[in-house]
Image: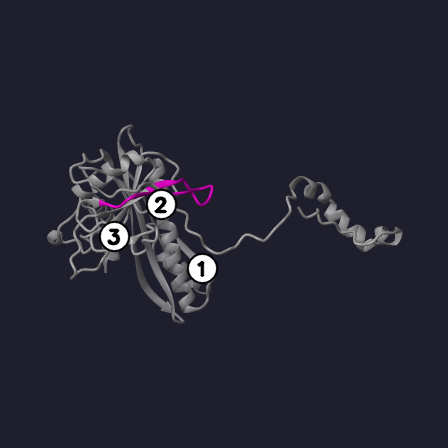
Amino acid sequence: MPEIPTTTRTTGTAATSSPRHRSRLHGLGYNLPDVFKAGWNGGGAATSTGHRRVVRTVDPVARDISRVLPLPVIGFADGVQTRSLLRHVEHRPVSLVWVAAGAVHAPSATLLEFRQRLELVGSAADGAVLAGLSRAGRGLPFHLLEELTPWGVAVATQALVDEWRQGLERDVIASTAIPEGKYLIVDGSIRRYACDGLVGVVKAVEDTQYLGDESALPDKAGWRSPVFSLPARTTSERAVVSTYLRLHSSPGTESWSHGLIRLEAHDPETLDAACALALRHRQSRGSGDPRWATHLEGMHRAEEVLKAFRHPFLEW
């Protein structure tokens, strides 16, 4: 094993007593020699910053889950958003933003939890304009962005909308009382949620690298792929188990991802029942929902309940 590095390269009183040498040894007053003695294990090459996907197989067998009993649920949790462009000032957009999130009981479609936020958003350079609109709106809140270019304001506004919506979703899910033995179905991944009793439904599945062999993706409706685990990446995440489920068969005239979703759960024992629930809530082409192939009926109904709180002016 390589020796612990030192700052002393020469011997003699002159070397050890020079101000430059002493400043290195002092290390801003901290005891760096003892830190190295306690922590040094030979060094080595630095850890690569390149991305590495970590997936572990839990169940290598694909299964037909069409006869599995569906998971008992308390409801569906989702978020909605609307961004209305009011005007431009020196080409910079000034927007009125509404975001909302809620947990909707199934099957009664009543609200279990609800949060919403309505604010004006624009560049700080246009603060006077937003302040005037705020007064016209009887104290309507406004948020000033530091960006000055039109495209910078547009990008920052969209990022802010996503941030606000996700924050409301987290608050709603953390506040929803989930009875023992029941589950709350969440739109999107549940890795960032600490509470139990959640199942996540991910509609965007173009990234299927979680499976080492993509031929393991299910072709027939009612089948799920092998089950795999996704470890937590940060201290604010939880590990989950996941699988791909085919809600609708995908003929050659459709995209390969037609009718394909991915589900997440904290417990492998609940995953098949969650797939069975998703099958029960799959929609038909004539449902009127443009995302019918991958959007669950319960989640679509939850969105409609939330959108009912949107002011009619925001529907323009």
User: Nearest the camera: 207 or 214?
Assistant: 214
Q: CA distance from mark 3 to mark 2?
A: 18 Å
Q: In which quadrant of the rendered view does residue 95 lie?
A: bottom left
Q: Residue furthest left?
A: 286
The scheme the figure's colours follow is one colour
Q: Main secondary structure of the magenta part?
A: loop
Answer with mark 1 or mark 2, whichever residue precedes in sequence. Answer: 1
List the residue tagged with mark 1.
145
Decide if residue 7 is on the left or right side of residue 194: right
Q: Residue furthest bottom?
A: 90
User: Nearest the camera: 22 or 12?
Assistant: 12
Q: Residue at x 28, y 29 (%)?
A: 179
Amino acid of disc 1: Leu
Q: CA distance from mark 1 to mark 3?
A: 24 Å
On the question of residue 247 being in view, the answer is: yes
Q: Check disc 2 and report its element: helix, strand or loop.
A: helix
List the residue tagged with mark 3.
311
Amino acid of disc 2: Leu
List the residue tagged with mark 2.
168
**Foreground tag (1 vs 3):** 1
User: Nearest the camera: 171 or 299?
Assistant: 299
Q: Check disc 3 and report its element: helix, strand or loop.
A: loop
- The magenta stretch is 224-241
Bin the neighbour count of mark 2 within 10 Å (Cα to Cα): few under 14, some 14-19, many 20 and up: many
Decide if residue 48 is on the left or right side of residue 308: right
Q: Residue at x 36, y 40 (%)?
A: 240
Q: Quadrant of the C terminus?
A: bottom left
Bin the neighbour count of mark 3 within 10 Å (Cα to Cα): few under 14, some 14-19, many 20 and up: few
